[in-house]
Amino acid sequence: MLTVSQIAPLKDRDPYLYETLTKIVASVNATSQRAGVDPSTPAPAPAPIASITVQASNGWFDISVADPSDARPGLFYFAESDTTPAFSAPRVYFMGASRNLYVQLGNQTLYWRAFSQYIGSLPSAPVTFGSPPTAVAGGGSTGPTPLPSSGSGVLPNGLLRGGNGFGVNPGSRVLKQTLL
């Protein structure tokens, strides 16, 4: 966070300049926190996702992440697969703001987990498919019927829709301030 220790003496000498600089510092800090670019400390991790569902058929893996948390825009999802339940060498799949992944990986047996993360934040705790982790066999050559969409981005709990990208958070609307 930006701190300017030289501002304090201005409070009595030039209160208008002091107020202006204080607002600028607050705006820079709010922007860097929202963008996740504060160099001093990483932003806290988002809440863990609720669950991950995986099905596979004929070499196609269909992954769906359930995340009913009240997150802010800019949340990204990641899925990981590994040949062992310890995830000692996981392959990472960037899902972006989407909560679904449909990928051809052939006839292999894989364990899956998923997590979320904001740019500049720590990642959430990973959640595995099954507890303990359950292996999913890829099988032959054509894909399964896709799982229902989980949507993407930040939406009120239970609301799903496509074309939402990073999401819409009505509380993040920028309001024009009028000075009288």
Image (spheres, rainbow, N blue to C red):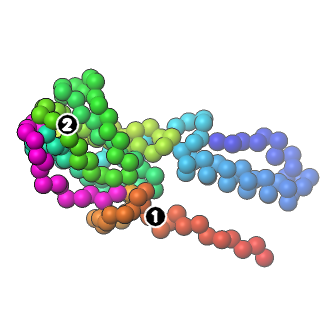
Task: Name the residue at the top extreme.
Answer: 88
Q: Position of residue 50 (x, y in %)?
A: 26, 49
Q: Earlier in the sequence, mark 2 or mark 1?
A: 2
Q: Which residues are magenta?
A: 135-152
Q: Which residue lies under the disc numbered 1?
A: 169
Residue 105 image label: 2
Is residue 142 within the magenta segment? Answer: yes
Say if 6 sits above or below 26 in the image.
Answer: above
Could you tell me which secondary element the residue under label 2 belongs to? loop
Q: CA distance from mark 2 to mark 1?
A: 35 Å
Q: Position of residue 35 (x, y in %)?
A: 55, 48
Depth check: give the residue in front, 51 or 111. Answer: 111
Say if 65 sits above or below 134 in the image.
Answer: below
Main secondary structure of the magenta stretch = loop
> Quarter holding the N terminus?
top right
Say if residue 7 shows up in the picture.
yes
> Quarter holding the C terminus?
bottom right
Q: Position of residue 19 (x, y in %)?
A: 79, 57
Count of numbered circles in the view? 2
* Residue under the point 15% across and 35% down: 106
* Residue under the point 42% across and 50% down: 75
Task: Name the residue at the right extreme.
Answer: 13
Q: Amino acid at mark 2?
A: Leu
Depth check: give the residue in front, 122 or 147. Answer: 147
